[in-house]
Amino acid sequence: MGSSSTEDVAGEVVVVTGAAQGIGRAVALEFAARGAKVAVVDLQAEAARAVVTEIEAAGGTAIAVGCDVADHESVNAAAADIAERLGTIGVLVSNAGVTRPAMIRKMTYEQWHQVVDVHLNASFYWLKAVVEGMIERGRGRMIFTSSSTAQNGSIGQVNYAAAKSGILGLVRTAARELGRYNILVNAVAPAAVTDMTRKVLTDPKFGADPSRTILGRYAEPEELAPTYVFLAGEASSLITGQIISVDGGGMFVR
Ligand SMILES: NC(=O)c1ccc[n+]([C@@H]2O[C@H](COP(=O)([O-])OP(=O)(O)OC[C@H]3O[C@@H](n4cnc5c(N)ncnc54)[C@H](O)[C@@H]3O)[C@@H](O)[C@H]2O)c1
């Protein structure tokens, strides 16, 4: 058993979706710094290539893969491409996301479907795309992305909160089904200042008040990334079916 998470993920093939920016980018950089071979998957292919350039400049190994996670054919093609170029996928970080906020009375069916597709349906597509390789290998780690909104709800985000709750059902069920194959499945509920949240977290008009979190501040994505590495390594070998909040105590407002 490895005692250091650095050794644990070295040489592992790690897929990070939505890795062109924000939390996904920070997670991709962290895995690469620990010696993993990282697939930087994103709709923004150019920005994904820039992350790969950054990783390579630091001496790491990564490839950029353009993919629309809301389309299962695109996901399957990306997964096959990654397996061919890097080897069997050992770690999945399903992180890509969008928001399409509107109050229930104004929300369109399109807004509903877009968000459910990119978060919940994409999680299932990636689960299917990586599971056979992990079973054959006898080891796998899947990390899906939920949100505190799964528990709390969020005004103007019924689509997002519902999708993030759905991911918890997916995670708990996948953990039950796949434990026998040494595949661990968990969810992270992150909070950090990114393009997705900057406005809401910094504009007092939205009630943003970091002093109400337990730590009294919001995080940058880099601070979250080590938790994902922990969940991919041997130090977390007994953790499965869980939702881990990495949000500076944001769930517990003062
Ligand atoms: N930032 C937070 O505080 C916070 C809080 C709770 C949950 N989350 C979740 O964390 C994850 C990352 O969020 P972030 O804040 O880094 O957001 P972000 O907007 O900075 O990054 C999201 C990335 O996903 C990519 N993406 C969007 N749709 C895609 C698609 N169809 N196919 C492929 N890639 C696609 C985008 O191009 C972008 O690079 C999301 O799942 C989000 O819901 C974030």
Image (cartoon, helix red, strand yellow):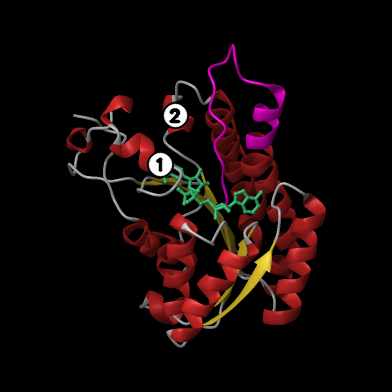
Q: What amino acid is labelled 1 in the image?
A: Thr
Residue placed at 37% from the left, 38% from the top?
A: 199
Q: What amino acid is labelled 2 in the image?
A: Gln
Q: Tell whether circle 1 marks a residue whose Cβ is less than 8 angstroms from ligand 1.
A: yes
Mark 1 = which residue? 197
The number of numbered badges drawn on the structure is 2
In the figure, residue 19 lies in which quadrant? Answer: bottom right
**Magenta stretch bounds:** 96-115
Q: Residues within 10 Å of mark 2 (few under 14, many from 20)?
A: some
Q: Are marks 2 and 1 in contact (CB under 8 Å)?
A: no
Residue placed at 60% from the left, 15% from the top?
A: 106
Q: Position of residue 88 (x, y in %)?
A: 69, 75
**199 or 56: nearer the viewer:** 199
Q: Residues within 10 Å of mark 1 (few under 14, many from 20)?
A: few
Residue placed at 78% from the left, 57% from the top?
A: 74
Mark 1, secondary structure of its residue: loop
Horizontally, is 33 left or right of 91 in the view? Answer: left
**82 or 173: nearer the viewer:** 82
Mark 2, secondary structure of its residue: helix
Q: Position of residue 14 (x, y in %)?
A: 57, 70
**Of the numbered discs in the image, which one, if any, rests on residue 151?**
2
In the figure, residue 22 lies in which quadrant? Answer: bottom left
**Position above or below: 86 against 108:** below
Determine if residue 14 is in view.
Answer: no
Horizontally, is 120 left or right of 12 in the view? Answer: right
Q: Position of residue 150 (x, y in %)?
A: 48, 32
Determine if residue 111 is in view.
Answer: yes
Horizontally, is 179 left or right of 4 in the view? Answer: right
Residue 114 inside the magenta-drawn segment: yes
